[in-house]
Amino acid sequence: MSLARTLGIGLNGLNGQLIEIEADIGNGIPGFILLGLPDAALNESRERIRSAARNSGLPMPNRRITVNLTPATMHKRGSGFDLAILLATLAADRSITLPADIVYLAELGLDGSLRPVAGVLPAVMAAVRAGYPRIVVAGDNQAEAELVAGAQVRSYAHLSQLLADYGADPADLKFRARHHSPRPRNTDWGTRQSGALDLAEVIGQGQGRYALEVAAAGGHHLLLTGPPGAGKTMLAERLPGLLPDLGDTQAMETTAVHSLASGGGLITALIRRPPFEAPHHSASMVALIGGGSGIPRPGAASRAHRGVLFLDEAPEFSAQALDALRQPLESGVLTIHRAAGAATYPARFQLVMAANPCPCGRNLGKGTDCTCTPMQRRRYLARLSGPLLDRIDMQLFVPALSARELALRAPAESSVLVAARVRAARSAASERLQRWGWVTNAEVSGAVLRHELSLPLATTAGLNAAAESLRLSARGHDRVLRIAWSIADLNEHACPTTDDIDVAIQLRQHGKGDVG
């Protein structure tokens, strides 16, 4: 029989599908035909496979080889099918005997070495869900693949080792040591402190520090405006250090996204610390939300899943890129459509934006020191659209420090102390929200706020009056209530009080006039 089959996994976003690789060897003009909508990297696998097989001592048959990747209507991408294609071909030539129901995920080097590929974690998860727990990967991917419960992982450094296990004559095989430098490995994914900067380093800014604590407690979005050098960036960079470690489910989601974006062979443990992404203001919309040719790739917004996405100098980003964040801010997911297909990535991040009051940054008070024209100021602030600002929970003005504040040496609270209060507040919120499957107050729906978590009319009277005078939208009204619940959790209140709601209103509106 000249037909053999192996298994691989095709990824569409984080969703994996079992791919059957069929190899047929027939008569005719020698050649290598690859079917099943392969992309450019997969098409190039034919030459990689030929060289890897020859340099391992078991060359490909000099006959007409046809390989089909099923389902044929699904676009296949990447080099992760190399090993599966080669093994199916050699099995069809009866050079080896393949065990049944094993999934292969590895790229081949020209010397026959097995190299890591991106997206091994979501691919192994998909294989285990489909009922195929036996996986073969490159050695550099073994630790990542073993993160999936129930996976039975075997790894190899070189193709000849695998072929020897599958019945090839050891006398024919040759092992070639890799001469290239190994890929750098990031061994501290699971333990690194993405928010290692200490809040104690921030001088003054009592309001900013408190807003940061409330944002951390409830998972709220935050806009910081103020003159250059006031401390906006310092505050934002210290938010990850206040957030608690990720739970098992959250850590698996976050690690799966980074597995796909890492390029392969970098992840050895679950990511337990909330990630921190701070793209430069020149980043395109594709870099921010994901995309690219073929099946869309994750962008900074998805890499910040369950962590912080910080946009410094936010008005310098393109208006199109900023408005593209509106949908994930509401839903927590990003669905990107391209001609080759659509991909969905998780994107439940905390958005923190920092902005100057104008391009020169001196449009304060009477604005006499400002050198910007009215048109420059309007264009600058117009980048932050009304619908986007309506989705930002808290908007805070960060004033410049006075000479007296700079001279003070009074010790400030460290991130460790604030993070302890945040953990307690998060624990209270999680216990209250667990029946709905939510983790933070920022995720609570408006329907639940108005029914199961409704507050007495006497408590919300001030909010209702403020909604009229400040022209709060329905979304803004709900966001004030979510902030109030976070403040109540920090204050160890069973439910928000009138004072909690008053503080929430101030955090929602303070500084709004400075943004436009």
Image: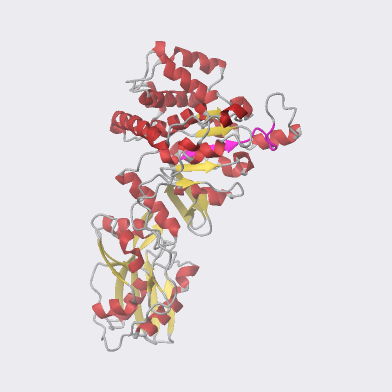
Q: Foreground: 52 or 144?
A: 144
Query: Is residue 435 rendered to the left or right of residue 359?
Result: left
Seen in the picture, residue 166 relative to 139 is either above or below; the reply is below
Seen in the picture, residue 336 relative to 157 is either above or below; the reply is above
- Position of the N terminus by quadrant: bottom left
Display colour scheme: secondary structure
Q: Which quadrant holds residue 331?
A: top left
Query: Is residue 253 rendered to the left or right of residue 131?
Result: right
Seen in the picture, residue 310 relative to 374 is either above or below; the reply is below
x and y percentages locating residue 68 in the rendered image:
38, 71
Q: Residue at x 31, y 61 (%)?
A: 143
Query: Is residue 434 rendered to the left or right of residue 488?
Result: left
- Position of the C terminus by quadrant: top right
Q: Foreground: 267 or 516?
A: 267
Q: Which quadrant holds residue 57?
A: bottom left
Q: Foreground: 60 or 207?
A: 207
What range of the chain is rendered magenta?
Answer: 350-362
Q: Residue at x 51, y 30 (%)?
A: 208
Q: Residue furthest bottom?
A: 171
Query: Is residue 396 rendered to the left or right of residue 273?
Result: right
Q: Is residue 289 visible?
A: yes
Q: Residue at x 47, y 72 (%)?
A: 43
x and y percentages locating residue 341 in the rendered image:
47, 55
Q: Residue furthest top?
A: 458
x and y percentages locating residue 112 in the rendered image:
38, 78
